[in-house]
Image (cartoon, helix red, strand yellow):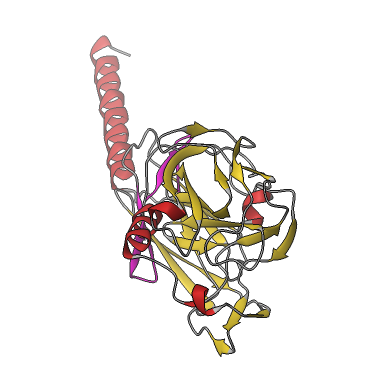
Amino acid sequence: MTSHSSSLRLTRRVLLVGTLASLTAIAIAGRAMAYEVVISPTDPQLGDTIAVVIRPEQPGASDPPVVTVNGRTQYSTFPLPDNRFRALIPTNPLDPPGRVVIQISGREDTRNLAVGLRNRSFPTQRITLSPSQSNLGTQHEFDRVAAFKQLVTPERFWHGAMVRPSQGQVSTSYGVRRYYNGVFAQDYYHRGVDYAAATGSPVVAPAAGRIALVGRVADGFELHGNTIGIDHGQGVLSIMLHLSRIDVNEGDIVQAGQVIGRVGSTGASTGPHLHWGLYVHGISVDPVPWREGRFE
């Protein structure tokens, strides 16, 4: 074999390898990138918070994808470890059960997934309020509470399971429908959990967070009574109502289990108890799954 023939074969081999490499690069560049998505729980029921965890196929992707539910409502996604993002989707007792379509869009191919939202039976309760309690509430109070419920801060304070905010016995569970003075409250459901306990019993923060709302009867909180609102971050909020005493100030950072106030019966209340409401993106959700540690 001459050196000239060997040189030609080597040149052809280099060209062939180069061509294959180019074709491979073109194929990779043209291949569709698709988000990996995990939805939990897989069989949610009314009142559950649905977690959508998204992992981009492209390594190191930093652009957060967008989650849209039923083609209408968009939810922010926030970063998790291992190049993942998460959105939290609230559901409540007034939602129609059935198919929920969740769309994930961004730099990679759009994905459409569906989960079945199961119906759930909620008990009915009859409440009698005195005439002096029937028309409680001031515009100042409503505006401040409404603004608090819209908070979606990027920092996450909570970690792991939430703790019980009171050692009192549960007197009213989440989602209860009510008659007030004999009239059914059509669009009402109990937006939280009530713990019956003696006046002055400690109330603790269910999770770490920033105190974002302090409202007092003296400042016009006639309906909610003495109130504390905690921003746990990323659209997750706790509100504590009917307190006899408040032991924190707006802007304070609190930890899970830290005493923040005392049980009372201020505002529209029929007896001493703590009302704990948990909100996700402005919607009252069932706190029980959060106390079971379903959200990392």
Tell me which corner region of the image, top left, top right, bottom left or bottom right, holds residue 112.
bottom left
- Judged left or right of residue 271, residue 153 is left
For the record, the magenta segment spans: 65-86
Residue 22 in sight in this render = yes
Furthest residue in direction top, as rendered: 3
- In the image, residue 8 above or below residue 85: above
For residue 110, side relative to residue 193 (left or right): left
Q: Is residue 229 left or right of residue 198?
A: left
Closer to the camera, 185 or 293? 185
Residue 78 coordinates in the image, percent (x, y):
41, 43
The residue drawn where x is 33% and y is 70% is 72
Say if 16 sits above or below 181 in the image.
above
Q: Give residue 119's position: percent from left, percent from top.
A: 61, 78
Is residue 69 a member of the stretch shown in magenta? yes
Residue 247: x and y in percent read: 54, 37
Q: Residue at x 37, y 50 (%)?
A: 151
Task: Decide whether residue 75 is among the magenta residues.
Answer: yes
**Numbered circles on residues, count:** 0
> Which image quadrant: the C terminus?
top right
| Image quadrant assignment for residue 281 | bottom left
Which quarter of the rendered picture does the N terminus lie within? top left
Residue at 52%, 79% in the rendered image:
131
Query: Residue 53 in the image: x percent, y percent?
Result: 49, 49
Q: Can the viewer see residue 234?
A: no
Q: Quadrant of residue 234?
A: top left
Q: Nearer the viewer, residue 107 or 235?
A: 235
